[in-house]
Image (cartoon, helix red, strand yellow):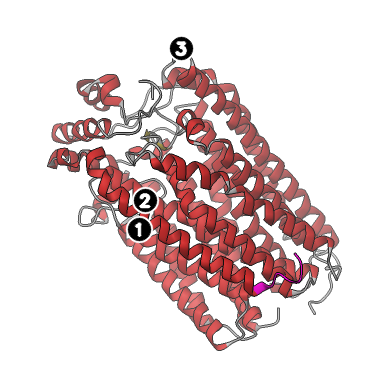
Amino acid sequence: MSQAFTKSMARNIFFGGATFFFLLLVALSFDTMQVLPKRDHRENITDAVARGKAVWEKNDCIGCHTLLGEGAYYAPELGNVYKRRGGEFVKAWIKSRPAEGTPGDRRQMPQFNLTDQELDDMVAFLKWTGEINTNNWPPNIEG
Amino acid sequence: MQYKSQAVAKPYFIAAIGLFVGQILFGLIMGLQYVVGDFLFPAIPFNVARMVHTNLLIVWLLFGFMGAAYYMIPEESESELFSPKLALTMFWIFLVAGALTIVGYLTVPYAALAKMTFNDLWPTMGREFLEQPLITKLGIVVVALAFLFNISMTILKGRKTSISLVLLLGLWGLAVFFLFSFYNPSNLVLDKYFWWWTVHLWVEGVWELILGSLLAFVLIKVTGVDREIIEKWLYMIIAMTLITGIIGTGHHYYWIGTPEYWQWFGSVFSALEPIPFFMMTVFAFNMVNRRRREHPNKAATLWALGTGVMAFLGAGVWGFLHTLAPVNFFTHGTQITAAHGHMAFYGAYVMVVLTIISYAMPMLRGRAANSAKAQVMEMWAFWIMTVSIVFITLFLTAAGILQVWLQRVSTTPMGFMATQDQVALFYWLREITGVMFLVGLVVYIASFFVAGETKEAA
């Protein structure tokens, strides 16, 4: 870079640019926070949904699955699993995982020993998640 | 080594490399579980292996960053470290806390770990990369604050350079944005929104400041180019990093419930994110070409050049590949993301930490550079690991393209598991390349034990 362009000019661009764009992020986030209630339907976050999220977290489901496309890529997307499979299937599936696994190459899901209450909460959480306005993602029901 | 207190960097670097080995071993376990589903089940389920793999990566990079700061700051400040004792104490606290957390992941079911650590009182666990129990997260904050105090006090009492200012900003930013990991509302959309303020603003924000300053420091040392020129480059690079990367956060806000306008902000700004990485490559090669001295440590120079190139490819090119919203609609949450993640982390952060270790470790062991024999071996390790990661990335990209096609583009979309079976070949190839990576890592570690003629440090 030429001599006319000094280090202190570069430093000013850095501080100015970083400050400006961070403030822009804050401003856009502020706007997003205003719009979100219409998109996430938070009025439907019941105690069951909140407890279901805790069950989701306590069993580290994100360590294998994606949820709205974020997480691990080892097992199916679950953001739309309520629509794809229905609540009863989800409960039966979680409940019926063999503790010692099934020998063979198929990927294994652990037996989490969830109570009936926890299973219901999980389904409530996944149902609510499926109703978030995600700009029509995923492209199809397979996730 | 010019200052006695720089010696505290050594245990940090050794721990970093040790944990790196652990990270790779668990990576290989996961890679095999992709195709041999019952491997180590139920002893180590995939989600546990993944937690260990990613958390070890984060922790060893943090060890690397802290070691780098303890090495660089006394030299930059022309002053001994404020408190070497505090630095060593924090080393042991961090290492023991980290080890206990990993042992916790591996020995009890995650739900039991959550219960044992009172996660219900303040739930923060079970989110990707932030799986640590609350007590570990608090420990990280304590260690980070003690570390920042130590470094800040050293800078305050000594010479203030741009490199140390940028490093300090990056490290403070790292600590500040980690605080968002304590915010976990029941509303998943809010949770995800601010989760990215830790994750994205770390790896595509403040960590790049740390990366830039480490690279600038090593380039000054090995090339002897005037500090004014190097620091000017540093400021321009990190200016572009934050100008593009902060609003670039928007590329995570396409499909998680956030408004459509993020598709524009995210696409436009993150499409520009390769620019600072490209500048970094040009910078590294330029400085080495204009060098004013022939530093005996050729290996460190190779790592520095490699960081520029691989960060540009992994973070820049592979990031751009799937960052535009219309593309990301199809690639979001597939192996394409995994491909990008692997090369970006290796190219940017793994390589820069190995760069500073390559430069500093011989000094810490009382010589300007390792023997020619040891350096040749280290350079072999560089090439084996780097070529391996390139192929891991290519195989995952191939798997990702097929996955997107079969599962999302096709008029008769296949289910997730059926699709995975179709791309199994590429997972096998990835696993074989992963073993090659481990070979490279073993060669790398062996290079530390190769003797031969060396010169005393100046």
Q: Residue at x 49, y 49 (%)?
A: B248
Pinpoint the chain carrying mark 2: B
Q: Residue at x 56, y 40 (%)?
A: B340
Q: Nearer the viewer, residue B178 or B273?
A: B273
Q: Main secondary structure of the magenta part?
A: loop
Pinpoint the chain carrying mark 3: B
For badge 2, the amino acid type reads Trp
Q: Say which quadrant the N terminus of chain B sits in.
A: bottom right
For badge 1, the amino acid type reads Phe
For badge 3, the amino acid type reads Thr
Q: Nearer the viewer, residue A49 or B287?
A: B287
x then y, percent, for residue B352: 64, 58
In the image, residue B246 above or below residue B141: above
Give the CA separation, mark 3 to mark 1: 41 Å
CB under 8 Å between discs 1 and 2: yes
Write down the residue under mark 1: B180
Q: Which residues are magenta?
A: A1-7
Pinpoint the chain carrying mark 1: B
Residue under disc 2 on the same chain as residue under disc 3:
yes
Write down the residue under mark 2: B195
x then y, percent, for residue B149: 46, 78
Write down the residue under mark 3: B411
Number of marks: 3
x then y, percent, for residue A51: 18, 42
| Residue B445 visible | no
